[in-house]
Amino acid sequence: MSLATPLLLLLLSLLLLTTIASADDTETHLHFFFHDVVSGLSPTAIRVAQAPTTSLSTTGFGAVVMIDDPLTEGPDRNSKLLGHAQGMYALASQEEAGLLMAMNLAFVSGDFNGSSLAVLGRNTVLSDVREMPVVGGSGKFRFARGYALARTHQFDLFTGDAVVEYDVYVRHE
Ligand SMILES: *[C@@H]1O[C@H](CO)[C@@H](O)[C@H](O)[C@H]1NC(C)=O
């Protein structure tokens, strides 16, 4: 066996590795506004459960909220609809406003119409930027991995309604 053979093998395996690594390299950045409407006659976020002690807690600890929140292109609720955030959040902290988010982002327009992303993470709503993991996806987002950055765009102290700006970065098939 000549000295060239191991070198050639090394080069070939490096080539193979780079091919495998780039096969699932599609990276997508999504930007949208999430509307959490708790007030009025047709809220998109509804409290479905709480503990007997929740009302005594300053952080709302123990409450569970089901959501079907519209995702729009702009901060205006009536701007183009891109999808829905469907799932729930639970007030999971005794020390601060800290949510456990468990939701699917179901897209209804453009390239990703019919595809969805699953988000599971911690959302301390009073922080400037909250990062939540994207743990999977369907359709065009099969094998998705990534993260979402959420920033409160608008919060109405009187009604509790919120508009949250999302930047989602995902790698997928
Ligand atoms: C999204 O897909 C659904 C189902 O295929 C289709 O009825 C609808 O027209 C599509 N919407 C857009 C905006 O492409």
Image (cartoon, helix red, strand yellow):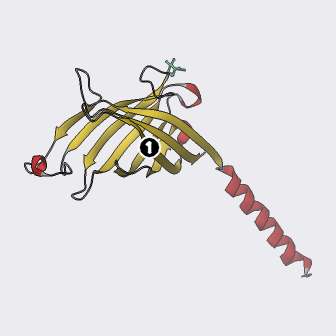
| Between 128 and 171, the one nearer to me in the picture | 128
From the top left corner, tell me how far across and down residue 15 is, in percent.
79, 62
Q: Name the residue tied to disc 1.
A: 151
Q: Is residue 10 left or right of residue 143?
A: right
Kindly identify the residue that appears in the image at 25 percent across and 53 percent down: 92
From the top left corner, tell me how far across and down residue 53 is, in percent.
9, 51
Instruction: Classify 79 as above or below 63.
Output: above
Instruction: Classify 61 as above or below 161.
Output: below
Instruction: Classify 66 as above or below 145.
Output: above
From the top left corner, tell me how far across and down residue 14 is, in percent.
77, 66
Q: Secondary structure at mark 1?
A: strand
From the top left corner, tell me how far across and down residue 160 is, in percent.
26, 34
Density class for disc 1 (Cα within 10 Å; few <14, some 14-19, many ≥20) is: some
What amino acid does circle 1 point to? Arg
Extreme residue toward the left, this view: 52
| Between 153 and 47, the one nearer to me in the picture | 153
- In the picture, the quarter occupied by the C terminus is top right
Kindly identify the residue that appears in the image at 52 percent across and 51 percent down: 145
Kindly identify the residue that appears in the image at 47 percent across and 40 percent down: 166
Give the number of callouts: 1
- In the picture, the quarter occupied by the N terminus is bottom right
Q: Is residue 80 left or right of residue 102?
A: right
| Between 76 and 89, the one nearer to me in the picture | 76
Query: Does ligand 1 reach within 8 Å of label 1's beta carbon?
Result: no
| Between 138 and 134, the one nearer to me in the picture | 134
Kindly identify the residue that appears in the image at 42 percent across and 46 percent down: 119
